[in-house]
Amino acid sequence: MASTPRTVQSYLDERPAWADGTPSPGTPITPMQIRIWALASAGKFFEGMVVFMGGIALPLIAQEFAISKLQHGLVTAASLAGILVGASLLGGLADRHGRKRLFVFEMVIFTVFLVLVCFSPDIWWLLACLFGIGIALGCDYPTAHLIISETTSTHLRGRLVLGAFAFQAVGALFGTAVGYLILANVQDIGAWRWMYAVAVIPALAVVAARLTITESPHFLMVNGRLEAARASTLRLLKREPTYPRAIDLAEPQGADGSAETGYGALFSRRNIRATMLASVPWFLQDLGTYGIGIFTPVILASTIGSAQEHATSIAVLVQKDMIAAKGAALIDVLLLVGILAAILFADRVGRIRLQVVGFVGCALGLAIAVLSATTDGATQTALIFVGFMLFNFMTNMGPNAQTYLIAGEVFPTEIRAKGAGFAASFAKIGAVATAFLFPILLTDIGTEVLLGGLVVTSLLGALITYIFRIETAGRSLETIGDEPFTL
């Protein structure tokens, strides 16, 4: 008896049933799906490690190369500027050349520039390499999300994507720990080079492993490659005992090849709501997340670190950096706790509600940190820690996690990489501006005024999220985006 053609997503969403027809509570995840998830998680781990470790490496880099205030800002902004370029320039290519090809290529780029960073002879070489690393990490924003979301079931999609995203927080914590351990054992101005070198061998292993995964069957279907999509779905769902034994695919609704696929499609009447929701709140949250994340060690060093304003020797500089690193590590733990809360609640509570609540919580945490300027001593330290810890928890439970998740869900398959890539690039405009201007503004206007401005942007993020809301929790990728745009 001939089977009825079905969509890719219906095969991915199929659940086993008992003999009386009662469905089981979940869809078993296959070995290939686990492999894809693990390799996508590795990319987010490297991002968190390299970007957030930069805050610890920065004082040593500044001392070795005797950099100016302008160059100081360029170092912190270089990798973020690369992410801005890579997310749209390379990430968007995944809509043309495939998710897997870009998934492998971005990690090759990352590894090459990581090695080159370790041998930087001057500040300009270092800036170029950090920019190259950022390009690779930017490409990973859309491709890592898509390679998971397009190869998994609807009810697991949110948890798996956010589970992978959690490794950004793990990487940030690991990078802080690596920085501290290297500082404790390598009392040398070049210790920062060893921090970056730690990631080289693991990155090579990830490159090799990414070559072994299957292509997204959703991508193959919208590009008219029916046989390849059938083979990819079978390989993706390979399990013991074998099921399904055969795949008979039908094109998803609307996949007639007539849809606009250029970047202009992001601003069409059909997709403008998704573009606004995916990009503007992400931009606003990156202002705070990257500013606070990168400069937490710097801010802590000025409040709980050495009393000396300027380090008079390498030993003093390293000691001050170590004190700040320990404080940053304690605060960064809340990033991990926050993302675990996001994994737990994203499908139960919904993406939009978590993002709105998270933005408001970020504003509250930053407001507490601002209050520290009115006190001193132990009270000041306590307020800074409480404020930053609340901010880190709320941003990872809310906007830092949900903006990433939403951006890869709200666009149709044919422009999903472009949409997610554009949103990530637009967000990184805020991150780059923050990273570049933070060192200058911390000196010129002070910590409390800077943090006060971020309170306002966080509240604005909550408002924009609510206005352009599209809830994607529990919905198939093949049906999201059909709503008309109304305010």
Image: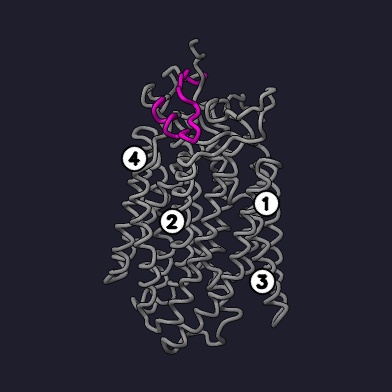
Q: Earlier in the sequence, mark 1 or mark 2?
A: 2
**Label 1, label 2: how far apart the Cα atoms are:** 23 Å
Q: Amino acid at mark 1?
A: Gly
Circle 2 sits on which residue? 80
Q: Please tell me the numbered disc located at residue 101.
A: 4
Label 2 CA crowd tier, 10 Å (few <14, some 14–19, many 20+)? many
Q: Amino acid at mark 4?
A: Arg
Label 3 with label 4: CB-CB less than 8 Å? no
Q: Residue at x 28, y 69 (%)?
A: 119
Asked if 360 appears above or below 129 in the picture, the reply is: above
Q: Is 371 displayed left or right of 111 in the figure?
A: right
Q: Position of residue 150 (x, y in %)?
A: 49, 34
Quadrant in the picture for residue 410: top right
Circle 1 sits on which residue? 358
Label 2 with label 3: CB-CB less than 8 Å? no
Q: From where the camera sits, is residue 340 visible? A: yes
Q: From where the camera sits, is residue 422 visible? A: no
Asked if 274 appears above or below 245 in the picture, the reply is: below
Where disc 2 sits, the SS reads helix
Circle 3 sits on which residue? 384
Is residue 63 a member of the stretch shown in magenta? no
Q: Position of residue 487 (x, y in %)?
A: 67, 31
Label 4 CA crowd tier, 10 Å (few <14, some 14–19, many 20+)? some
Name the main secondary structure of what is drawn in magenta. Answer: loop
**Label 2, label 3: how far apart the Cα atoms are:** 25 Å
Query: Which range is magenta?
Result: 229-253
Q: Earlier in the sequence, mark 1 or mark 4?
A: 4
Where disc 3 sits, the SS reads helix
